[in-house]
Protein backbone atom coordinates (compact mmCIF):
# COMPACT_ATOMS: atom_id res chain seq x y z
CA UNK A 1 0.00 0.00 0.00
CA UNK A 2 1.19 3.50 -0.80
CA UNK A 3 0.66 6.69 1.14
CA UNK A 4 0.20 10.06 -0.44
CA UNK A 5 2.44 12.51 1.39
CA UNK A 6 1.95 16.27 1.10
CA UNK A 7 5.37 17.89 1.45
CA UNK A 8 5.90 21.05 3.44
CA UNK A 9 8.81 23.41 2.90
CA UNK A 10 10.83 25.75 5.01
CA UNK A 11 12.15 28.32 2.54
CA UNK A 12 13.53 26.38 -0.43
CA UNK A 13 14.13 23.14 1.47
CA UNK A 14 11.82 20.47 2.78
CA UNK A 15 10.65 20.95 6.33
CA UNK A 16 12.06 18.24 8.63
CA UNK A 17 8.49 17.02 9.23
CA UNK A 18 8.25 15.83 5.60
CA UNK A 19 11.07 13.35 6.34
CA UNK A 20 9.06 12.21 9.36
CA UNK A 21 5.92 11.62 7.26
CA UNK A 22 7.91 9.43 4.87
CA UNK A 23 9.58 7.71 7.82
CA UNK A 24 6.18 6.94 9.35
CA UNK A 25 4.95 5.41 6.08
CA UNK A 26 8.12 3.30 5.78
CA UNK A 27 7.78 2.13 9.39
CA UNK A 28 4.66 0.17 8.42
CA UNK A 29 6.13 -1.08 5.18
CA UNK A 30 4.52 1.43 2.86
CA UNK A 31 5.97 3.43 0.01
CA UNK A 32 5.42 7.15 -0.30
CA UNK A 33 4.16 9.18 -3.20
CA UNK A 34 5.25 12.69 -2.32
CA UNK A 35 3.34 15.68 -3.62
CA UNK A 36 5.33 18.92 -3.72
CA UNK A 37 3.11 22.02 -3.79
CA UNK A 38 4.45 24.45 -6.40
CA UNK A 39 7.27 22.03 -7.20
CA UNK A 40 9.29 23.24 -4.25
CA UNK A 41 12.11 20.97 -3.08
CA UNK A 42 11.06 18.26 -5.56
CA UNK A 43 14.62 17.03 -6.12
CA UNK A 44 15.18 16.80 -2.38
CA UNK A 45 11.95 14.79 -1.98
CA UNK A 46 13.03 12.41 -4.76
CA UNK A 47 16.28 11.66 -2.92
CA UNK A 48 14.61 10.37 0.26
CA UNK A 49 14.53 6.67 0.99
CA UNK A 50 11.10 5.08 0.67
CA UNK A 51 9.80 7.53 -1.93
CA UNK A 52 8.34 5.81 -4.97
CA UNK A 53 7.37 8.88 -6.95
CA UNK A 54 7.33 12.65 -6.62
CA UNK A 55 4.51 14.68 -8.11
CA UNK A 56 5.20 18.37 -8.48
CA UNK A 57 2.00 20.35 -8.65
CA UNK A 58 2.66 23.78 -10.10
CA UNK A 59 0.45 26.78 -10.75
CA UNK A 60 -0.36 30.37 -9.79
CA UNK A 61 -2.70 29.07 -7.09
CA UNK A 62 0.32 28.51 -4.84
CA UNK A 63 1.41 32.17 -4.90
CA UNK A 64 -0.08 32.80 -1.48
CA UNK A 65 -1.55 30.45 1.11
CA UNK A 66 -5.23 29.83 0.53
CA UNK A 67 -6.17 26.40 1.90
CA UNK A 68 -9.13 26.26 -0.49
CA UNK A 69 -7.03 26.87 -3.60
CA UNK A 70 -4.18 24.63 -2.44
CA UNK A 71 -6.40 21.68 -1.62
CA UNK A 72 -8.31 22.00 -4.91
CA UNK A 73 -5.02 21.86 -6.82
CA UNK A 74 -3.52 19.04 -4.73
CA UNK A 75 -6.67 16.94 -4.60
CA UNK A 76 -6.39 15.95 -8.26
CA UNK A 77 -3.21 13.93 -7.63
CA UNK A 78 -4.05 12.48 -4.20
CA UNK A 79 -4.80 8.80 -3.84
CA UNK A 80 -5.73 6.54 -0.95
CA UNK A 81 -4.50 7.45 2.50
CA UNK A 82 -3.00 10.89 2.82
CA UNK A 83 -0.38 11.93 5.38
CA UNK A 84 0.30 15.59 6.19
CA UNK A 85 2.12 17.38 8.97
CA UNK A 86 -0.10 18.61 11.80
CA UNK A 87 1.22 22.13 11.23
CA UNK A 88 -1.38 24.92 10.95
CA UNK A 89 -1.31 24.82 7.14
CA UNK A 90 -1.17 21.02 7.10
CA UNK A 91 -4.22 20.74 9.34
CA UNK A 92 -6.15 23.14 7.14
CA UNK A 93 -5.25 21.48 3.84
CA UNK A 94 -5.95 18.09 5.44
CA UNK A 95 -9.41 19.12 6.62
CA UNK A 96 -10.24 20.53 3.18
CA UNK A 97 -9.02 17.39 1.38
CA UNK A 98 -11.00 15.14 3.72
CA UNK A 99 -14.19 17.14 3.18
CA UNK A 100 -13.63 17.21 -0.61
CA UNK A 101 -13.09 13.46 -0.79
CA UNK A 102 -15.77 12.73 1.82
CA UNK A 103 -13.35 10.71 3.92
CA UNK A 104 -12.56 11.11 7.62
CA UNK A 105 -9.62 12.99 9.06
CA UNK A 106 -7.58 12.16 12.14
CA UNK A 107 -5.45 15.05 13.31
CA UNK A 108 -2.25 15.10 15.30
CA UNK A 109 -1.39 11.41 15.66
CA UNK A 110 1.72 10.41 17.62
CA UNK A 111 1.98 6.75 16.58
CA UNK A 112 1.13 4.56 13.61
CA UNK A 113 1.24 0.79 13.23
CA UNK A 114 0.05 -1.75 10.72
CA UNK A 115 -3.65 -2.20 10.45
CA UNK A 116 -3.74 0.89 10.21
CA UNK A 117 -3.83 1.68 13.90
CA UNK A 118 -3.08 5.20 15.08
CA UNK A 119 -2.90 6.94 18.44
CA UNK A 120 -3.59 10.54 19.23
CA UNK A 121 -3.56 12.45 22.50
CA UNK A 122 -6.88 13.96 23.54
CA UNK A 123 -7.93 16.30 26.36
CA UNK A 124 -4.54 18.06 26.23
CA UNK A 125 -2.65 14.84 26.79
CA UNK A 126 -4.79 13.62 29.70
CA UNK A 127 -5.81 10.59 27.61
CA UNK A 128 -4.76 8.78 24.46
CA UNK A 129 -7.16 7.52 21.83
CA UNK A 130 -6.44 4.47 19.69
CA UNK A 131 -8.25 4.31 16.35
CA UNK A 132 -8.37 1.77 13.54
CA UNK A 133 -8.60 3.14 10.03
CA UNK A 134 -10.18 0.76 7.53
CA UNK A 135 -10.34 2.61 4.25
CA UNK A 136 -9.14 5.96 3.05
CA UNK A 137 -8.53 8.79 5.47
CA UNK A 138 -6.46 11.91 5.88
CA UNK A 139 -4.03 11.64 8.79
CA UNK A 140 -1.95 14.49 10.17
CA UNK A 141 1.20 13.69 12.14
CA UNK A 142 2.47 15.56 15.15
CA UNK A 143 5.85 17.14 14.36
CA UNK A 144 8.85 15.38 15.96
CA UNK A 145 6.83 12.34 17.05
CA UNK A 146 8.12 10.09 14.24
CA UNK A 147 11.53 8.89 13.07
CA UNK A 148 12.68 10.73 9.98
CA UNK A 149 13.44 8.81 6.79
CA UNK A 150 17.01 8.98 5.55
CA UNK A 151 18.39 9.84 2.15
CA UNK A 152 19.01 7.25 -0.52
CA UNK A 153 16.12 7.37 -2.95
CA UNK A 154 16.06 8.09 -6.65
CA UNK A 155 12.41 8.57 -7.38
CA UNK A 156 11.10 9.91 -10.68
CA UNK A 157 9.52 13.36 -10.68
CA UNK A 158 6.30 14.08 -12.57
CA UNK A 159 5.12 17.64 -13.00
CA UNK A 160 1.44 18.51 -13.16
CA UNK A 161 0.01 21.95 -13.93
CA UNK A 162 -3.03 22.98 -11.96
CA UNK A 163 -5.13 26.07 -11.54
CA UNK A 164 -7.49 27.07 -8.75
CA UNK A 165 -9.04 30.36 -7.69
CA UNK A 166 -7.34 32.19 -4.85
CA UNK A 167 -10.04 33.83 -2.78
CA UNK A 168 -7.86 35.50 -0.17
CA UNK A 169 -6.06 38.73 -1.03
CA UNK A 170 -3.12 40.09 0.87
CA UNK A 171 -3.48 43.78 1.71
CA UNK A 172 -0.30 44.25 3.65
CA UNK A 173 2.62 42.14 4.88
CA UNK A 174 3.98 42.98 8.29
CA UNK A 175 7.43 41.59 9.06
CA UNK A 176 8.16 40.65 12.59
CA UNK A 177 10.85 42.50 14.45
CA UNK A 178 12.32 39.41 16.04
CA UNK A 179 14.34 36.94 14.04
CA UNK A 180 14.19 34.44 16.86
CA UNK A 181 13.25 30.86 16.25
CA UNK A 182 9.54 30.12 16.64
CA UNK A 183 8.65 27.86 19.56
CA UNK A 184 6.87 25.40 17.27
CA UNK A 185 10.00 25.03 15.13
CA UNK A 186 12.55 24.63 17.89
CA UNK A 187 14.18 21.48 19.17
CA UNK A 188 14.98 23.18 22.49
CA UNK A 189 12.77 25.76 24.18
CA UNK A 190 13.51 27.85 27.24
CA UNK A 191 10.40 29.45 28.71
CA UNK A 192 9.95 31.99 31.45
CA UNK A 193 7.06 32.63 33.78
CA UNK A 194 6.10 35.16 36.39
CA UNK A 195 8.78 33.72 38.67
CA UNK A 196 11.52 35.53 36.77
CA UNK A 197 10.32 38.86 38.09
CA UNK A 198 10.10 41.12 35.07
CA UNK A 199 10.05 41.20 31.29
CA UNK A 200 13.62 42.58 31.25
CA UNK A 201 14.92 39.37 32.79
CA UNK A 202 13.96 37.45 29.65
CA UNK A 203 17.29 38.68 28.26
CA UNK A 204 18.98 36.05 30.45
CA UNK A 205 16.83 33.35 28.87
CA UNK A 206 17.72 34.74 25.43
CA UNK A 207 21.41 34.42 26.27
CA UNK A 208 20.92 30.75 27.04
CA UNK A 209 18.78 30.31 23.93
CA UNK A 210 21.65 31.71 21.86
CA UNK A 211 24.12 29.24 23.33
CA UNK A 212 22.07 26.12 22.57
CA UNK A 213 20.06 27.34 19.56
CA UNK A 214 16.79 27.37 21.45
CA UNK A 215 13.57 29.31 21.07
CA UNK A 216 12.27 31.46 23.92
CA UNK A 217 8.75 30.81 25.18
CA UNK A 218 6.54 32.33 27.83
CA UNK A 219 3.69 31.42 30.15
CA UNK A 220 0.24 32.92 29.75
CA UNK A 221 0.74 35.16 32.79
CA UNK A 222 3.69 37.02 31.28
CA UNK A 223 1.96 37.33 27.91
CA UNK A 224 -1.24 38.72 29.41
CA UNK A 225 0.26 40.77 32.22
CA UNK A 226 3.65 41.86 30.93
CA UNK A 227 2.81 42.13 27.24
CA UNK A 228 5.12 39.47 25.83
CA UNK A 229 4.05 38.64 22.24
CA UNK A 230 1.32 36.01 22.05
CA UNK A 231 3.33 33.99 19.51
CA UNK A 232 5.68 33.10 22.39
CA UNK A 233 2.92 31.74 24.61
CA UNK A 234 3.06 28.02 25.34
CA UNK A 235 -0.07 26.37 26.70
CA UNK A 236 -3.82 26.05 26.38
CA UNK A 237 -4.49 29.27 24.49
CA UNK A 238 -0.98 29.46 23.06
CA UNK A 239 1.20 26.99 21.21
CA UNK A 240 1.40 23.26 21.79
CA UNK A 241 5.04 22.27 21.57
CA UNK A 242 6.94 18.97 21.47
CA UNK A 243 10.65 19.82 21.57
CA UNK A 244 13.41 17.41 22.62
CA UNK A 245 14.08 19.61 25.62
CA UNK A 246 11.80 22.10 27.34
CA UNK A 247 13.34 24.27 30.04
CA UNK A 248 10.77 25.96 32.31
CA UNK A 249 12.14 28.78 34.42
CA UNK A 250 9.98 30.36 37.11
CA UNK A 251 6.87 28.65 35.75
CA UNK A 252 4.70 27.07 38.42
CA UNK A 253 3.04 24.70 35.95
CA UNK A 254 -0.65 25.61 35.81
CA UNK A 255 -2.66 22.91 34.08
CA UNK A 256 -3.15 25.30 31.11
CA UNK A 257 0.61 25.54 30.68
CA UNK A 258 1.16 21.80 31.04
CA UNK A 259 -1.42 21.26 28.30
CA UNK A 260 0.95 22.90 25.83
CA UNK A 261 4.27 21.32 26.78
CA UNK A 262 3.83 18.05 28.65
CA UNK A 263 4.53 16.00 25.51
CA UNK A 264 8.06 17.39 25.25
CA UNK A 265 10.63 14.60 25.18
CA UNK A 266 12.54 15.94 28.20
CA UNK A 267 11.54 18.65 30.63
CA UNK A 268 13.86 20.57 32.92
CA UNK A 269 12.15 22.70 35.56
CA UNK A 270 13.83 25.42 37.56
CA UNK A 271 11.69 26.83 40.34
CA UNK A 272 12.28 28.06 43.86
CA UNK A 273 9.10 26.41 45.13
CA UNK A 274 9.81 22.70 45.70
CA UNK A 275 6.07 21.98 45.55
CA UNK A 276 5.45 23.69 42.20
CA UNK A 277 3.31 21.41 39.99
CA UNK A 278 5.83 21.78 37.14
CA UNK A 279 8.09 19.32 39.01
CA UNK A 280 5.34 16.71 38.57
CA UNK A 281 5.98 16.55 34.82
CA UNK A 282 9.70 17.35 34.85
CA UNK A 283 12.37 14.74 34.09
CA UNK A 284 14.91 16.95 35.80
CA UNK A 285 14.12 19.51 38.46
CA UNK A 286 16.31 22.07 40.16
CA UNK A 287 14.92 23.80 43.22
CA UNK A 288 16.57 27.22 43.12
CA UNK A 289 15.83 30.82 42.37
CA UNK A 290 16.37 31.83 38.77
CA UNK A 291 18.95 34.39 39.91
CA UNK A 292 21.11 31.55 41.23
CA UNK A 293 20.36 28.90 38.65
CA UNK A 294 20.46 30.85 35.38
CA UNK A 295 24.09 32.11 35.62
CA UNK A 296 25.17 28.59 36.56
CA UNK A 297 23.21 27.13 33.66
CA UNK A 298 24.68 29.69 31.31
CA UNK A 299 28.27 28.91 32.24
CA UNK A 300 27.74 25.13 32.24
CA UNK A 301 26.19 25.26 28.77
CA UNK A 302 28.86 27.61 27.39
CA UNK A 303 31.53 25.25 28.63
CA UNK A 304 29.80 22.32 26.99
CA UNK A 305 29.43 24.11 23.68
CA UNK A 306 32.97 25.51 23.54
CA UNK B 1 -25.92 40.36 8.25
CA UNK B 2 -26.25 36.86 9.70
CA UNK B 3 -23.20 35.93 11.73
CA UNK B 4 -22.86 32.29 12.82
CA UNK B 5 -20.54 31.33 15.63
CA UNK B 6 -19.74 27.62 15.92
CA UNK B 7 -19.27 26.56 19.53
CA UNK B 8 -18.19 23.36 21.22
CA UNK B 9 -18.57 22.38 24.83
CA UNK B 10 -15.47 20.64 26.21
CA UNK B 11 -14.30 19.46 29.62
CA UNK B 12 -12.89 22.46 31.44
CA UNK B 13 -9.08 22.48 31.29
CA UNK B 14 -8.98 22.06 35.06
CA UNK B 15 -11.34 19.05 35.01
CA UNK B 16 -9.94 15.63 35.77
CA UNK B 17 -10.32 13.02 33.04
CA UNK B 18 -11.25 9.60 34.38
CA UNK B 19 -11.09 6.51 32.23
CA UNK B 20 -13.11 3.41 32.92
CA UNK B 21 -13.58 0.37 30.71
CA UNK B 22 -11.35 1.73 27.96
CA UNK B 23 -13.39 4.91 27.56
CA UNK B 24 -13.27 8.39 29.00
CA UNK B 25 -16.07 8.59 31.53
CA UNK B 26 -17.87 11.77 30.49
CA UNK B 27 -20.20 11.61 33.49
CA UNK B 28 -17.26 12.08 35.81
CA UNK B 29 -16.22 15.38 34.21
CA UNK B 30 -16.82 17.94 36.94
CA UNK B 31 -17.13 20.99 34.72
CA UNK B 32 -17.92 21.59 31.07
CA UNK B 33 -16.98 24.87 29.41
CA UNK B 34 -17.07 26.62 26.07
CA UNK B 35 -13.83 25.75 24.27
CA UNK B 36 -11.41 28.67 24.90
CA UNK B 37 -10.79 29.62 21.25
CA UNK B 38 -14.54 29.62 20.59
CA UNK B 39 -14.86 32.37 23.20
CA UNK B 40 -12.70 34.62 21.02
CA UNK B 41 -14.82 33.79 17.97
CA UNK B 42 -17.96 34.64 19.93
CA UNK B 43 -16.52 37.94 21.15
CA UNK B 44 -15.50 38.91 17.63
CA UNK B 45 -18.98 37.96 16.36
CA UNK B 46 -20.61 40.19 18.97
CA UNK B 47 -18.38 43.08 17.96
CA UNK B 48 -19.13 42.50 14.28
CA UNK B 49 -22.85 42.58 15.08
CA UNK B 50 -22.48 45.79 17.08
CA UNK B 51 -20.57 47.47 14.25
CA UNK B 52 -22.64 46.27 11.31
CA UNK B 53 -26.01 45.23 12.67
CA UNK B 54 -27.50 41.80 12.06
CA UNK B 55 -28.07 38.71 14.10
CA UNK B 56 -25.68 36.38 15.88
CA UNK B 57 -26.56 32.71 15.57
CA UNK B 58 -24.78 30.41 18.02
CA UNK B 59 -24.63 26.84 16.72
CA UNK B 60 -23.37 23.72 18.41
CA UNK B 61 -23.46 20.04 17.55
CA UNK B 62 -23.30 17.86 20.62
CA UNK B 63 -25.22 16.05 23.35
CA UNK B 64 -27.97 17.71 25.39
CA UNK B 65 -25.56 19.00 28.01
CA UNK B 66 -24.12 21.43 25.46
CA UNK B 67 -27.37 23.45 25.51
CA UNK B 68 -26.13 25.14 28.65
CA UNK B 69 -23.23 26.61 26.69
CA UNK B 70 -25.70 28.10 24.20
CA UNK B 71 -27.49 29.79 27.09
CA UNK B 72 -24.12 31.16 28.22
CA UNK B 73 -23.63 32.56 24.70
CA UNK B 74 -27.09 34.17 24.86
CA UNK B 75 -26.14 35.83 28.15
CA UNK B 76 -23.47 37.85 26.35
CA UNK B 77 -25.62 38.62 23.32
CA UNK B 78 -26.26 35.67 20.97
CA UNK B 79 -29.68 36.14 19.31
CA UNK B 80 -30.51 32.67 18.01
CA UNK B 81 -29.46 29.43 19.66
CA UNK B 82 -29.24 26.28 17.57
CA UNK B 83 -28.55 22.86 19.04
CA UNK B 84 -27.89 20.04 16.58
CA UNK B 85 -28.21 16.59 18.10
CA UNK B 86 -25.06 14.52 17.77
CA UNK B 87 -26.99 11.27 17.51
CA UNK B 88 -25.40 9.08 14.85
CA UNK B 89 -22.29 11.22 14.67
CA UNK B 90 -19.13 9.12 14.62
CA UNK B 91 -16.47 11.36 13.12
CA UNK B 92 -15.61 14.97 12.43
CA UNK B 93 -16.86 14.76 8.84
CA UNK B 94 -20.37 14.18 10.19
CA UNK B 95 -20.10 17.18 12.47
CA UNK B 96 -18.99 19.36 9.56
CA UNK B 97 -21.86 18.17 7.37
CA UNK B 98 -24.41 18.99 10.06
CA UNK B 99 -22.91 22.39 10.87
CA UNK B 100 -22.73 23.29 7.17
CA UNK B 101 -26.37 22.29 6.67
CA UNK B 102 -27.45 24.43 9.63
CA UNK B 103 -25.42 27.36 8.30
CA UNK B 104 -27.27 27.07 4.99
CA UNK B 105 -30.64 26.78 6.74
CA UNK B 106 -30.08 30.00 8.67
CA UNK B 107 -28.77 31.85 5.58
CA UNK B 108 -25.52 32.80 7.20
CA UNK B 109 -23.15 35.37 5.65
CA UNK B 110 -20.07 34.82 7.77
CA UNK B 111 -18.96 31.97 10.04
CA UNK B 112 -16.67 32.35 13.05
CA UNK B 113 -15.22 29.48 15.06
CA UNK B 114 -12.24 28.56 17.23
CA UNK B 115 -9.06 27.35 15.49
CA UNK B 116 -9.45 24.05 17.34
CA UNK B 117 -11.48 22.65 20.22
CA UNK B 118 -9.68 21.99 23.47
CA UNK B 119 -10.78 18.32 23.67
CA UNK B 120 -9.30 16.89 20.47
CA UNK B 121 -7.28 19.97 19.44
CA UNK B 122 -7.88 18.90 15.86
CA UNK B 123 -8.78 22.06 13.98
CA UNK B 124 -10.77 20.36 11.21
CA UNK B 125 -14.12 22.06 11.69
CA UNK B 126 -13.47 25.54 10.27
CA UNK B 127 -11.77 24.53 7.01
CA UNK B 128 -13.98 21.42 6.64
CA UNK B 129 -17.19 23.44 6.94
CA UNK B 130 -15.75 26.01 4.52
CA UNK B 131 -15.05 23.25 2.01
CA UNK B 132 -18.63 21.95 2.16
CA UNK B 133 -20.00 25.49 1.81
CA UNK B 134 -17.50 26.30 -0.97
CA UNK B 135 -16.48 29.23 1.18
CA UNK B 136 -13.19 30.99 1.78
CA UNK B 137 -11.47 30.17 5.06
CA UNK B 138 -8.81 32.06 6.95
CA UNK B 139 -7.36 30.38 10.03
CA UNK B 140 -5.49 31.66 13.10
CA UNK B 141 -7.11 35.09 12.99
CA UNK B 142 -7.64 37.22 16.05
CA UNK B 143 -9.98 39.98 14.86
CA UNK B 144 -12.23 40.40 11.83
CA UNK B 145 -13.69 43.66 10.55
CA UNK B 146 -16.30 44.08 7.85
CA UNK B 147 -16.04 47.18 5.64
CA UNK B 148 -17.20 47.96 2.10
CA UNK B 149 -18.29 44.41 1.46
CA UNK B 150 -14.97 42.94 2.55
CA UNK B 151 -13.85 41.05 5.60
CA UNK B 152 -10.45 42.27 6.76
CA UNK B 153 -8.35 40.28 9.18
CA UNK B 154 -4.78 39.57 10.27
CA UNK B 155 -3.16 36.16 10.11
CA UNK B 156 0.35 34.93 10.86
CA UNK B 157 2.72 34.48 7.91
CA UNK B 158 6.21 33.04 7.43
CA UNK B 159 7.74 36.44 7.95
CA UNK B 160 5.46 37.82 10.64
CA UNK B 161 1.86 38.59 9.92
CA UNK B 162 -0.28 39.78 7.05
CA UNK B 163 -3.48 41.72 6.62
CA UNK B 164 -5.79 39.80 4.31
CA UNK B 165 -9.26 40.35 2.90
CA UNK B 166 -12.00 38.07 1.63
CA UNK B 167 -15.36 38.60 -0.05
CA UNK B 168 -18.49 36.48 -0.05
CA UNK B 169 -19.23 33.68 2.39
CA UNK B 170 -16.19 33.31 4.60
CA UNK B 171 -15.16 31.18 7.55
CA UNK B 172 -12.72 32.54 10.13
CA UNK B 173 -11.02 30.25 12.65
CA UNK B 174 -9.86 32.17 15.72
CA UNK B 175 -6.70 32.07 17.74
CA UNK B 176 -6.47 33.83 21.07
CA UNK B 177 -6.42 37.55 20.44
CA UNK B 178 -5.62 40.62 22.42
CA UNK B 179 -9.34 41.39 22.73
CA UNK B 180 -10.83 41.34 26.18
CA UNK B 181 -13.67 38.84 26.49
CA UNK B 182 -16.91 40.32 27.81
CA UNK B 183 -18.60 38.84 30.86
CA UNK B 184 -22.38 38.52 31.12
CA UNK B 185 -24.32 40.92 33.34
CA UNK B 186 -27.26 39.93 35.53
CA UNK B 187 -29.82 41.13 33.02
CA UNK B 188 -28.13 39.16 30.27
CA UNK B 189 -28.16 36.03 32.36
CA UNK B 190 -31.86 36.43 33.22
CA UNK B 191 -32.84 37.07 29.59
CA UNK B 192 -30.77 34.13 28.40
CA UNK B 193 -32.64 31.72 30.65
CA UNK B 194 -35.86 32.51 28.78
CA UNK B 195 -34.31 32.20 25.36
CA UNK B 196 -35.60 29.29 23.31
CA UNK B 197 -33.04 26.82 22.00
CA UNK B 198 -33.89 25.50 18.56
CA UNK B 199 -33.15 21.79 18.63
CA UNK B 200 -32.65 20.05 15.31
CA UNK B 201 -31.51 16.64 14.16
CA UNK B 202 -29.67 15.27 11.16
CA UNK B 203 -32.99 14.34 9.51
CA UNK B 204 -34.33 17.90 10.00
CA UNK B 205 -31.26 19.02 8.09
CA UNK B 206 -31.56 16.26 5.47
CA UNK B 207 -28.07 15.06 6.24
CA UNK B 208 -27.48 11.37 5.75
CA UNK B 209 -24.82 10.27 8.23
CA UNK B 210 -23.10 7.45 6.42
CA UNK B 211 -20.85 4.93 8.13
CA UNK B 212 -17.33 5.89 9.01
CA UNK B 213 -14.17 3.99 8.22
CA UNK B 214 -12.66 5.00 11.52
CA UNK B 215 -13.22 2.82 14.55
CA UNK B 216 -12.50 3.98 18.07
CA UNK B 217 -10.70 1.06 19.73
CA UNK B 218 -10.02 2.55 23.13
CA UNK B 219 -9.20 5.55 25.21
CA UNK B 220 -6.46 5.05 27.74
CA UNK B 221 -4.51 7.09 30.27
CA UNK B 222 -1.32 8.64 28.89
CA UNK B 223 1.81 6.48 29.19
CA UNK B 224 3.30 6.82 32.66
CA UNK B 225 6.38 8.93 32.74
CA UNK B 226 9.29 7.80 34.88
CA UNK B 227 9.58 9.76 38.09
CA UNK B 228 11.74 12.83 37.56
CA UNK B 229 15.06 13.52 39.27
CA UNK B 230 14.87 16.53 41.55
CA UNK B 231 17.84 18.39 42.97
CA UNK B 232 17.81 20.96 45.76
CA UNK B 233 20.00 23.98 45.16
CA UNK B 234 21.74 25.73 42.28
CA UNK B 235 25.00 23.84 42.87
CA UNK B 236 23.40 20.91 41.05
CA UNK B 237 23.07 22.76 37.75
CA UNK B 238 26.30 21.26 36.36
CA UNK B 239 25.13 17.75 37.31
CA UNK B 240 21.85 18.28 35.52
CA UNK B 241 23.55 19.73 32.44
CA UNK B 242 25.79 16.67 32.18
CA UNK B 243 22.73 14.43 32.55
CA UNK B 244 21.01 16.34 29.75
CA UNK B 245 24.00 15.51 27.58
CA UNK B 246 24.83 11.97 28.68
CA UNK B 247 21.50 10.50 29.85
CA UNK B 248 18.98 12.35 27.71
CA UNK B 249 21.28 13.21 24.78
CA UNK B 250 19.38 16.41 24.11
CA UNK B 251 22.17 19.00 24.19
Image (cartoon, coloured by chain):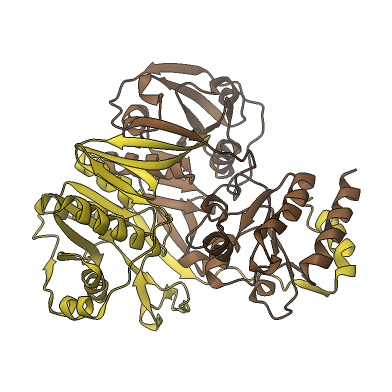
Chain colours: A brown, B yellow
* Count of numbered badges drawn on the protein: 0
Asked if one can make out residue A214 in the rendered structure from this viewpoint, the answer is: yes
In-front residue for pair A95/B58: B58
In-front residue for pair A226/A245: A226
Asked if one can make out residue A136 in the rendered structure from this viewpoint, the answer is: no
Q: Quadrant of residue B68?
A: bottom left
Residue B20 x/y as whole percent: 45, 80
- Say if B220 sits above or below A299 in the image: below
- Say if B227 sits above or below A212 in the image: below
Q: In which quarter of the image is residue A132?
A: bottom left
**Residue found at x 38% / y 47%:** B141
Residue A140 x/y as whole percent: 46, 46
Residue A270 x/y as whole percent: 75, 67
**Residue found at x 51% / y 50%:** A114
- Say if B23 sits above or below B139 in the image: below
Residue A45 x/y as whole percent: 56, 26
Q: Quadrant of residue A191?
A: bottom right
**Residue found at x 43% / y 78%:** B21
Q: In this view, does B43 lie to the left or right of B50?
A: right
Q: In this view, does A205 lie to the left or right of A94?
A: right
Q: Is residue B235 left or right of residue B188?
A: right
In-front residue for pair A239/A107: A239
Amino acid sequence: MNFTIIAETNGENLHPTTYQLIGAASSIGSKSIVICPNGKAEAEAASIEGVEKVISVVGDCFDIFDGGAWSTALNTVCEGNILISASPNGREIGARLAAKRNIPIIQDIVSISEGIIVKRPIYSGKAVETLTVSGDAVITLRPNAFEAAGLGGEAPINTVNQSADIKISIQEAINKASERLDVTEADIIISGGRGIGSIENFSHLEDIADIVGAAVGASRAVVDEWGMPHRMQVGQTGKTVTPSLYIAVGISGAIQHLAGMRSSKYILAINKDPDAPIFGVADYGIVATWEEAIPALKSALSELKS
Amino acid sequence: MNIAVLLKQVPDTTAKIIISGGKVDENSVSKWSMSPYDEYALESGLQMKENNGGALIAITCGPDRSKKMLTDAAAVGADTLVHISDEGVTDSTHVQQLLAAAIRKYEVDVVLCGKQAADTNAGSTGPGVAEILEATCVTLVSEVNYTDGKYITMRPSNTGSEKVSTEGTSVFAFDKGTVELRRPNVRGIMMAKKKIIESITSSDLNVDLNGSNIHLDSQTPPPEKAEGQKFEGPEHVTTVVSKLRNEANVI
